[in-house]
Image: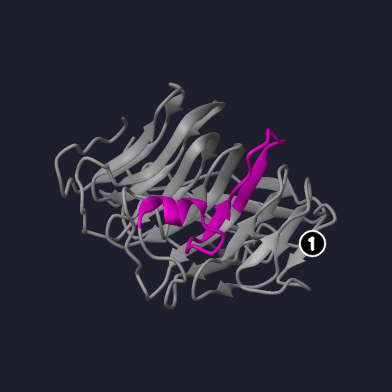
Amino acid sequence: NLPTKSVVEYGTTTAYGQTTLEPDRFYYLHLHYLTGLQPTQVYHYRFVATDERGGQIVSGDRILTTQALPAAIPVPGNLSGPPYVLNQANAYYSLSQDIDSNTRGISIKAGGTTLDLNGHTITYDQGTPRVQGAWDSYLYSDSSTAGVHYWIWAPTPVTRILNGTIRQGQNNGQGALGLGFNPILIYSGEVEIAGVTTEYSGDSVSGIHNNEGTLHAHHNVIVDRGTGIANRHAGIKGMFCASVGTNGLHHNLVKRVRQQGLMTNAGDKIYSNEIYMDSYATNAFGIR
């Protein structure tokens, strides 16, 4: 019942041989990436946790069997970019390498799409942005800077963003009302985000922002490294969604935000999250 630092030991035998990275400090929630796994392979794993008093807890041996991925479209593959445009409805896209982009990393323009980051990192906003100005310029433009940008009007099957890291780059662009230069910027639709780590630091930039859609977000890590807030009334948020999906916002670790943690305009299924906030301005709420 104390926060811990933890690792997952894993491998094809009970000797394990591979270990995930230990977190930067003690937490209750832990997200670990098991990388380099082969499909249809049996793996042994166990949890090792050390609490603030030095007590260590080691779980028993456990077993998982990986599955073969569905037929995936590789990114970059034959796509030109960045930004890389994902425009096939109901398709499964999988990153085959890390991506660095001066502006946007990925544009999703078809519903029912799965973007599997596949353990890789998208670093966006490395150079001069193509779009500057008011919040609506970032929201509606086809070339504004974001890590992953999803835009669609019509009702579609669930779109998913999974399994990796999205990080703001050295340009460190400034947003407005929390919009612009977000790691994930969604206009509408029903979206699931899971197993994603987001890091950002630009002034007035929020983390995961779903402007008018429905969001199911779970087992994500949010790291806000910024301090600038141009308008305290806007509420610079770790995660915002117009509406919480039926499965809710849960098991998200918000390591640090400058003003607000999780916010929604509709829905109440927000549970089992861990949130740390610096409250650089008033109107600061953990969950709003």
| Position of residue 261 measured from the top left corner of the image (x, y, whole percent) | 32, 40
Query: In the displayed structure, would residue 246 be above or below residue 281?
Result: above
Scheme of image coloration: one colour
* Image quadrant occupied by the N terminus: top left
User: Does 77 sit left or right of 147 as displayed?
Assistant: right
What is the span of residues highlighted in magenta in the rendered image?
134-162
Name the residue at 76% across, 66% down: 74
| Image height of 101 relative to 220, above or below | below
Residue 279: give x, y in percent of width and height. Answer: 18, 45
Foreground residue, 53 or 140? 140
Which x, y percent locates residue 63?
70, 46
Examine the image and state in which quarter residue 262 appears.
Answer: top left
Q: Is residue 156 magenta?
A: yes
Q: Is residue 116 above or below residue 270?
A: below
- Tag count: 1
The reply to whether residue 12 is visible in this rendering is no
- Label 1, secondary structure: give it: strand
- The residue sitting at the right extreme is 71
Q: Nearer the viewer, residue 17 or 88?
A: 88
Task: Relative to 204, say whether 125 is above or below.
Answer: below
Left or right: where does residue 136 sit relative to residue 226?
Answer: right
Q: Residue 201 magenta-drawn? A: no
Left or right, 224 with respect to 32, comes to: left
What amino acid does circle 1 point to?
A: Ile
| Whole-percent x, y for residue 76 in the image | 71, 71
Instruction: Specify whether residue 281 is in view.
Output: yes
Residue carrying label 1: 73
Give the class, few, some or many, for how many residues have Cα within 10 Å of label 1's Cα (few <14, many ≥20). some
Camera-side residue of 176 and 164: 176
Identify the residue shown where x is 71% and y is 43%.
111
Rendered residue at 85%/56% (across/down): 71
